[in-house]
Image (cartoon, grey):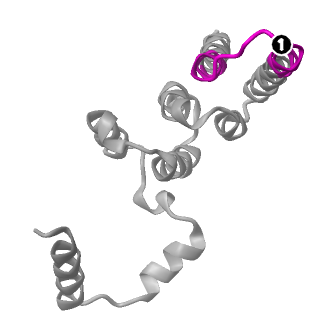
Amino acid sequence: MIQNQIRQYARKMLADHYRREIERFPVQPSPANLERLRADRARLATQIEDVEDAIGRGEWESALWQLPRRYRWDFFALIQYELSDTEYGHMLAEVWQDTEWPSKNLHSWIQLFTNPRLRRELLMDPRRLGKLWSERWSLAEIRAAANRCNKRRGA
């Protein structure tokens, strides 16, 4: 049941993306432009099929990365309850890094990052996490770094 809703939503997102692209670049009726529109429709059909196959197999990350960037956050918010805790943490970190305007959905981001099922160590891959734990940071170093950032911003 939920997978059908997710499939419909993904299909709608992809169709919306291609509709916006066509509106952004209007074409005059010519054989070359009509051929381009046919190719776009074929690409859309293939992409919808690939996303639906990934959803059917429960490969959420694969489905997520096949969507255009502007729809990935919405898709993640939709599938978050289908993910294991480990998948949730890793995909949240990836979507966060991929988002262009996180402040647009700031309240929702705060809810996602304060979710009790999120364990902070899942936000980093093991290599980066190991590097972080191996380094010894003093309070003076942290304050110096914060001061440099504030000076750059003019704060």
Q: Vertically, is 123 above or below 103?
A: below
Magenta segment, prevailing SS (helix, strand or loop): helix
Q: Vertically, is 61 above or below 15?
A: below
Q: Tell me where residue 35 sits by quadrant.
A: top right
- At horizontal 31% and vertical 44% (from top left) the residue drawn is 114
Q: Position of residue 82 (x, y in %)?
A: 58, 29
Quadrant for the C terminus, please: bottom left
Q: Tell me where residue 125 sits by quadrant.
A: bottom right
Seen from the viewer's position, the closer of residues 136 and 76 is 76
Q: Is residue 150 left or right of residue 108?
A: left
Seen from the viewer's position, the closer of residues 77 and 145 is 145
Residue extent of the magenta highlight = 17-39
Q: Is residue 144 magenta?
A: no
Q: Position of residue 83 (x, y in %)?
A: 58, 36
Q: Is residue 116 left or right of residue 46?
A: left
Q: Is residue 30 left or right of residue 82?
A: right
Q: Tell me where residue 116 sits by quadrant.
A: top left
The residue pinned by badge 1 equals 30
- At horizontal 23% and vertical 82% (from top left) the residue drawn is 142
Seen from the viewer's position, the closer of residues 53 and 102 is 102
Amino acid at circle 1? Ser
Q: Vertically, is 1 above or below 124?
A: above
> What secondary structure is found at the residue carrying circle 1?
loop
Quadrant for the N terminus, please: top right
Q: Is residue 32 magenta?
A: yes
Q: Position of residue 50 (x, y in %)?
A: 81, 27
- At horizontal 30% and vertical 88% (from top left) the residue drawn is 137
- At horizontal 16% and vertical 77% (from top left) the residue drawn is 151
